């Protein structure tokens, strides 16, 4: 749609095109000849199409700091225009039809992808409404999704402290979680502990690591204070047991003197997940090693605490720096020394 010449318009390049903007809401203008400028006055609601409306909105994301947003939103809006037609008026898209299509298009994708796609449509729709091109947002029947919990990340120190000091949790959970964090041991290794494995005066215990190797884990004051209260004088049986006696026949090694069974990994994991809002026991171990690495603990000590035999495995686990890896490898392999 052409208009009469007015005040000079500013231009900026985008994807090999010339983009024309004036003080009113203008559209994206593509000229087939470089240097040729065509100018458009704001369109009336009855004249605007979905394609032109999308171009006009994207033209507002002109700053260099918005380049990434313009690229992502542009791809999403082109997908919308491709489905409903570039020549369709924005107001012709019904909310129910849009919600059905959107769910089919992005329903199986990650919550973050769903949310970004919805944000692109809503941001454009808000702009179109301000221009008088759209009466109601076609995405109004849709809702943003909660992101899936990141079960690979380390918990913050504040998050760990809040979990370990909760007074509404049972003594068993507080002792187990404290021991896992202070020893950085695998949850399966700690759950296999028997009372006879503990060296209470020296705050350590024998564990069987992944792969079968026998090793020693060491805990700190928090665990040392909780363990005697948890054991209540018991001298045999599993350290961490169920609250009630076992209802099925189990090996004697998995029962304490009163008949309570060894706490299973599944039970322990479910209790921690419920209390932490979806985190895992693995994250607690990951957090301990990450915090140690951030405090400057050396790679050999981190490997001893974690029971890792692969330095590179530990690096991805505890964010050990590349320099620390090189130093450790040089200590173990003279050929790597500078």
Image (cartoon, grey):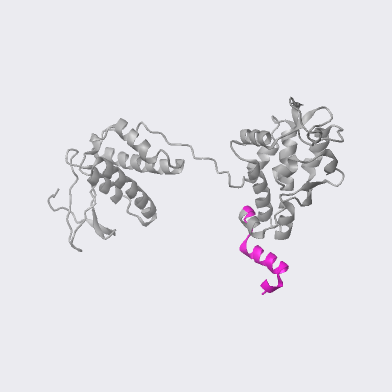
Residue drawn at 83 percent across, 43 percent down: 197
Does the stretch in magenta take in 137? no
- Determine whether 315 is above or below 86 in the image: below
Dividing the image into 4 quarters, which one contains the C terminus? bottom right
The image quarter containing residue 264 is top right
Does the stretch in magenta take in 324? yes
Horizontally, is 145 left or right of 137 in the view? right
Q: Nearer the viewer, residue 90 or 196?
A: 196
Q: Main secondary structure of the magenta part?
A: helix
Q: Position of residue 170 (x, y in %)?
A: 72, 30
Q: Nearer the viewer, residue 38 or 279?
A: 279
Horizontally, is 309 left or right of 135 in the view? right
Q: Position of residue 337 (x, y in %)?
A: 68, 73
Which residues are drawn in magenta?
317-338
The image quarter containing residue 97 is top left
Q: Position of residue 87 (x, y in %)?
A: 20, 43
């Amino acid at each position: 749609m052409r208009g009469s010449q007015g005040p000079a318009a500013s231009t900026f390049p985008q994807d090999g095109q010339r983009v024309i903007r004036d003080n009113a809401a203008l559209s994206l203008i593509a000229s087939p000849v470089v240097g040729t400028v065509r100018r458009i006055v704001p369109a009336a609601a009855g004249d605007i199409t979905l394609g032109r409306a999308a171009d006009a909105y994207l033209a507002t994301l002109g700053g260099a700091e918005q380049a990434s947003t313009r690229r992502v939103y542009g791809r999403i809006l082109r997908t919308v225009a491709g489905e409903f037609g570039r020549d369709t008026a924005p107001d012709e898209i019904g909310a129910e039809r849009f919600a059905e299509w959107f769910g089919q298009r992005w329903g199986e994708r990650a919550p973050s992808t769903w949310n970004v796609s919805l944000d692109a449509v809503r941001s454009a729709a808000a702009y179109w409404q301000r221009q008088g091109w759209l009466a109601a947002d076609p995405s109004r029947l849709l809702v943003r999704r909660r992101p899936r919990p990141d079960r690979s990340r380390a918990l913050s120190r504040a998050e760990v402290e809040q979990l370990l000091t909760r007074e509404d949790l049972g003594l068993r959970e507080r002792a187990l979680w404290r021991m896992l964090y202070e020893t950085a041991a695998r949850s399966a290794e700690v759950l296999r502990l028997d009372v006879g494995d503990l060296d209470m005066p020296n705050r350590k215990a024998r564990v069987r690591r992944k792969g079968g190797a026998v090793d020693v884990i060491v805990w700190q004051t928090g665990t040392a204070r909780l363990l005697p209260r948890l054991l209540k004088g018991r001298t045999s049986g599993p350290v961490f047991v169920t609250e009630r006696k076992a209802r099925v026949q189990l090996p004697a090694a998995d029962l304490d003197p009163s008949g309570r069974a060894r706490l299973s990994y599944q039970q322990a994991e479910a209790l921690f997940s419920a209390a932490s809002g979806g985190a895992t026991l693995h994250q607690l171990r990951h957090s301990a090693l990450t915090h140690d690495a951030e405090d400057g603990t050396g790679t050999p000590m981190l490997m001893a605490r974690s029971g890792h035999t692969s330095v590179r495995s530990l690096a991805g686990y505890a964010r050990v720096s590349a320099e620390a890896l090189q130093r450790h490898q040089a200590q173990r392999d003279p050929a790597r020394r500078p």
